[in-house]
Image (cartoon, grey):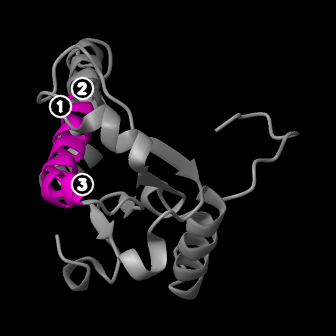
Amino acid sequence: MAEAENGGRWAGYTIYRTTYTPQSNAAFPRMVDLTTKYMKDGFKYMKDGFYNYYESSRQYNSRANEFNITPWDKIWPNYQPRVIEDASQFDGASIDQLREHFRAEATERDVLDEFPSYRMFIVIDEESFQTLQNAPLPEKRRYYVKLVEALEVDLYESFPG
């Protein structure tokens, strides 16, 4: 879903690229595709869990039949990452530099902390690149990227997320 079609908001995580080598240049599009497939696989898992709950609740709750669409029905088919790759600005950038950029941009657009897509972002740096470069498509084994919280963590908040 294009930002213009979504009220200027994007339906997907922001991915920052911070490694720019000939090898990463060739492999980066595949890594974005792989990350997207893993995210969609996760959405499918959550959606399947919701529908299992929905089916079991139909026995006990007459209103359950009123629900015929879930958030995942809208998010999953439209999920597209927002890729930020600019070697002149982000080659070797630190997590703090990326967080500052992300927060400034989200604050300017008045979307910071509205949804996970506006609260956290993914970093594909050299370490993540090495982990993902030979990763297969989603299966039981998982590979890792860095997911960074854009907001300061409140140590006194009751929910640790």
Is 144 covered by the magenta stretch? no
Q: Quadrant of the N terminus?
A: bottom left
Which numbered disc flags the more N-terminal residue, 1 or 3? 3
At label 1, which amino acid type do we have?
Asn
Q: Is residue 69 visible?
A: no
At label 2, which amino acid type do we have?
Tyr
Q: Which residue is mark 2?
A: 45
Q: What residue is at 17 percent from the left and 42 percent from the top? A: 34
> Residue 35 in the image: x percent, y percent?
24, 44
Q: What residue is at 40 percent from the left and 47 percent from the top? A: 126
Q: Circle 3 sits in a helix, a strand or a loop, which is it?
A: helix
Residue located farthest toward the front when viewing the structure as drawn? 22
The mark total stands at 3
Label 2 environment density (alpha carbons within 10 Å; few <14, some 14–19, many ≥20)? few
Q: Which residues lie in the magenta part?
A: 22-44
Between disc 2 and disc 1, the foreground one is 1
At label 3, which amino acid type do we have?
Ser
Q: Circle 2 sits in a helix, a strand or a loop, which is it?
A: helix
Q: What residue is at 52 percent from the left and 81 percent from the top? A: 105
Disc sitting over residue 134 in the figure: 1
> Residue 49 in the image: x percent, y percent?
27, 21
Q: Which residue is mark 3?
A: 24
> Residue 141 in the image: x percent, y percent?
25, 15
Q: Is residue 72 left or right of residue 158?
A: left
Label 1 environment density (alpha carbons within 10 Å; few <14, some 14–19, many ≥20)? few
Which numbered disc flags the more N-terminal residue, 2 or 1? 2
Q: What residue is at 54 percent from the left and 71 percent from the top? A: 102
Is 31 covered by the magenta stretch? yes
